[in-house]
Structure formats: structure tokens, C-alpha cells
Amino acid sequence: MEITVLDIQILKALHREVKEVSLLIKEVTAPYKALQQATKWLDQQEACQLLNISKRTLQTYRAKGILGATQINRKTYFRLSEVELLLQGERPLKKQKK
């Protein structure tokens, strides 16, 4: 086991730098917080439950362009607002070909 002893000034300087980095992160991400909070996202299971459909039907909706999705890593997310529009019948069930 190794024990490291830090001088109090070094510890305070490190603490100050960590606070500065934290403030910079908050400053950089601040413009995106409102967007993130304004848009509610559902995962695949939540969207299926809300629409009362199977995962395969949900995949078909994605493939036909009925319901848009965003994929982050291997997980798929759907906008709650789009799912609600589909529930209200304001979105067509078939994509119109031009």
C-alpha cells in the first residue's frame, strides 16, 4: 500500500482548478440544457407501451418514416411529442411517396 502526503497549498490549488473546470463545463453546456429539458425522450419500451404496439411494429414505423427516432450508441430514442402526435392521429400511418 502506498501513502501519498500532499501539502495543504497543493491540495487547495487542486481544489481551485477542479472548481474552474467544473464552471467551464457548466458554461459550455448551458445553451443545451434548455433544449434537453424541452425535449422529452422515450426509449423503445416506453414508446411501445404508450402506443400499445410491439417492438417489431415500432421498428416498422421507423423504417416507413412514420415515427422518427434517434440512436445513441445502440439504444433508440423517440420524441414524446412525435409519439403523442401519432396517438392523436395527426401523423399519417403511411409515408407518402413523391
Image (cartoon, rainbow, N blue to C red):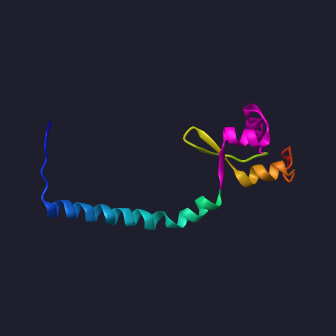
Which quadrant is home to the N terminus? top left
Asked if residue 58 is among those painted magenta in the image, a careful observer would answer yes
Q: Main secondary structure of the magenta part?
A: helix
Q: Could you tell me residue 78's position as x and y percent? A: 68, 47
Residue 62 visible, this orientation: no
Q: Could you tell me residue 82's position as x and y percent? A: 75, 52
In terms of image quadrants, where is residue 35?
bottom right
x 77%, y 40%: residue? 61
x 75%, y 37%: residue? 58
The region drawn magenta spans 40-65
Asked if residue 28 is among those painted magenta in the image, a careful observer would answer no
Q: Could you tell me residue 63's position as x and y percent? A: 75, 39
The answer to whether 8 is drawn above or below residue 44 in the figure is: below
* Residue placed most toward the observer, 37 or 67: 37
Q: Could you tell me residue 18's position as x and y percent? A: 30, 61
Q: In the figure, is residue 65 to the left or right of 94?
A: left
Q: In the figure, is residue 4 to the left or right of 88?
A: left
Q: In the figure, is residue 16 to the left or right of 2?
A: right
* Residue placed most toward the observer, 63 or 36: 36
Please count the marks in the image.
Answer: 0
* Residue placed most toward the observer, 8 or 19: 8
In terms of image quadrants, where is residue 56?
top right
* Residue placed most toward the observer, 29 or 42: 42
x 72%, y 42%: residue? 47
x 83%, y 45%: residue? 95
Residue 18 visible, this orientation: yes
